Every structure is written in structure tokens, then in C-alpha cells.
Image (cartoon, rainbow, N blue to C red):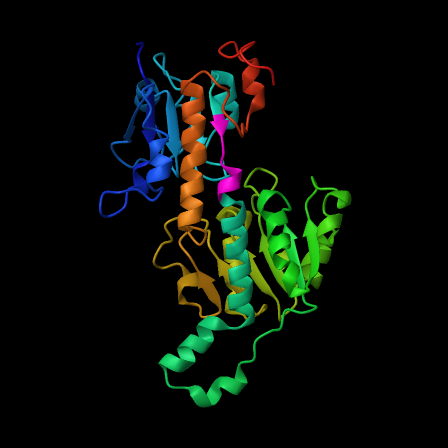
Amino acid sequence: MGEKFRVGVSPEVVTADGGTVFGEDAMKILDDPAIEWEYLPERVPALTQEHAARYDAFCLMTAKVTRETLSGRHRRLKLVARFGVGYDSVDVPACTEAGVMLTITPEGVRRPVASSVMAYVLALAHRMLLKDQLVRENRWAEKGNFLGMGLTGRTLGVIGVGNIGSEVFRLAQPFDMRLLGCDPNVPQSEVDSLGVTMTDMDTLMRESDFVSVNTLLDDTTRGLIGAREFGLMKPTAYFINTSRGPVVQEAALTETLENNLIAGAAIDVFAQEPVAMDNPLLKLDNVILAPHAICHTDECMQLLGKLAFQAAADLAHGRKAEHLVNPEVLDHPAWSGKWSQ
């Protein structure tokens, strides 16, 4: 038997008891005679040439894969399998030039992130954190002063109507809300069955009672939402970001919340992660915060693990990995003619 296909897995998926967030069923995929796997020995912000020379595949959470990672003469890396759908941590052109496949796990996050968005909508609408505080501070007599917002007939606007954004609309169906979408890549005909009206971002910001951001982070979306866009929102509206922190100009978001220019926000992603303890968002009581993990459920993690590990197993057995971000890599000499696109 030839040399085994070597897989390096992000160490941050190890739990406190030495187990894994992915569960046994996902890990069984790597229990394969063709595969030898291990957790990467340490957490690093970016993987090195030495990592790329040691492994055939990375299964990654947060570590970056840069052009430098791939530039070593002894590179054996063939696959980067991302847990999730964001890939701003990976230099995609460098991967393609080097003949390295990049895969994502869309089914793993579609429902978990979308249900997280709806959880935020409900928590904000019902002023859940404030009402919890009223009980803890024995302020029962004040409860009539803090009415929530009924959802029937309210407007939910989603910026980025792809894998997750479209699922948000599906989950919103029972609430009888008006649904607005903004995405230059999604035609109206694609969302007609969901009762969604596609519009421009300014209209969405002006008319929505809840704005949910679900875009990828790239050069077209970095800093997409700033003071001008927040200034278009109703003072009674809420803002939700579960995409990537840099899509939003965080200073503008902070100023908007500090001055109560909108009713509140729910934020899972930040410009800097982990968040600095002097970040002013931490001091505000009109925002719900989560550590880029609001969607982390057993369902989510099991699916992320299964899909990423299956990509590695497929390649180990000579099969084309699914959910390629860079299908043009198949034209690289390393893969040319091996599979039809």
C-alpha cells in the first residue's frame, strides 16, 4: 500500500474533555485505511510552508492559507476544506495557481445560521434581554413600559440572498412578514416562490424593520454598510449581522447604537476577533453579542465535519471533492483531464 493521504485538522475543534465538536459520526469518515490524520499541533494565525509540505489536505476553521503558505518547493497540499461557507481567510487565486482545491460546506450552515437570524429577530422583537433584566433587578412594575414589536406585517430585509439568506426567508414564512431582498446576483424570478421582492440596498435599509446581513466578505462587500446606510434605517428598526465583521463599518455601527439612531442590533461577527475588551460595543445595552458562534449547534457542527472530511476522503480515493469554490483549478496540470467539470 502506498503512502497515506495526510489530513491536518484545526485544533480549535477539540473540546475541553479531549473530544471533538463534530461528534463520532463525522470523525468516522477519517477512520479510513487510505487516510492518516491529526490535529494541527498548535493554533497559528496563518499556516506555513512547513504545514503545506506535511499534509495533503487541511480541514480548517480560522487559520489563514496565504500565497506564502503555498510557495514552498516541497508542498504536498492538494486540498483546503473550510468548515463553513466563508473563505476570506484563504487566498483563492494562489490556491488555483498552485493546483490546490478549496471546498466549503454550504449544507452545514444553511439552516443553523438562518435559524440563528430568526432567533435574533425574535429576541430583538420581544426585547428578551431587557425583560430578563427586569426580572433580575425586581423591576416588574416597569414591564408595561417596554413593549416589543409584533412581526405580522413588519418588513424583514436580507442583504445577500444566497445559501443562507434564502433559507432565512423560508424560515420567516409563518410570521407573515413582508420580505425584501438585495443581491446583485439573484434575479427576482429566483425568489418569487418565497414571496420575496428584490430591491436596491437603499430601499431595503429605509423600509425594513429588521435588516439581516448574509453576504460573503470580498472586495465588493468590505465596508458595505456604514454611516450613510445606517442613517437610512428607521429609528425603530433592528440590525443583524451574522456574515463577516468587515462587511460593516464597526465604528459607524457603534456610533449608531450609542446615539440610539436605531432600536438595537444583534452582532455575531466583528472587525477584530476575539473582540478587544475595550471595544465600546461591549458597554451598550441595545445590542446582543455572540462570539462568531451563534449558529454553533450539534446539528451545525456534525454537518460541517461530515462535509469537510468527506471532501478529504473523496480526494484520498481519487474522487473529485464536492462544493469547489475554485472549479477552474481542475484545468491545472495537476488535475487536467482527471475529471470532467
Query: In this rendering, does residue 272 appear at all?
Result: no
Q: Position of residue 230 (x, y in %)?
A: 61, 60
Q: Is residue 80 left or right of residue 237?
A: left
The C terminus - image quarter: top right
Query: In this rendering, does residue 316 appear at all?
Result: yes
**Viewer-side residue, 12 vs 269:** 12
Location of residue 315 with respect to 162 vertically, above or below: above
Q: Position of residue 117 (x, y in %)?
A: 54, 56
Is 174 magenta? The answer is no
| Image quadrant assignment for residue 180 | bottom right
Most extreme residue toward the bottom, as rendered?
141
Q: Which residues are magenta?
A: 102-108
Location of residue 294 with respect to 131 vertically, above or below: above
Query: Residue drawn at (53%, 81%), measured in percent from left and top?
Result: 146
Query: Residue drawn at (40%, 58%), measured in percent from left and top?
Result: 279
**Viewer-side residue, 271 vs 333:** 333
Location of residue 125 with respect to 212 vertically, above or below: below
Q: Is residue 312 left or right of residue 266?
A: left
Q: Position of residue 314 (x, y in %)?
A: 45, 23
**Viewer-side residue, 146 vs 256:** 146
Query: Residue drawn at (36%, 59%), measured in percent from left and top?
Result: 278
Is 105 magenta? The answer is yes
**Viewer-side residue, 170 vs 183:** 170
The N terminus - image quarter: top left
Q: How many marks?
A: 0
Query: Residue drawn at (32%, 41%), measured in percent from left and top?
Result: 13
Q: Position of residue 258 (x, y in %)?
A: 50, 68
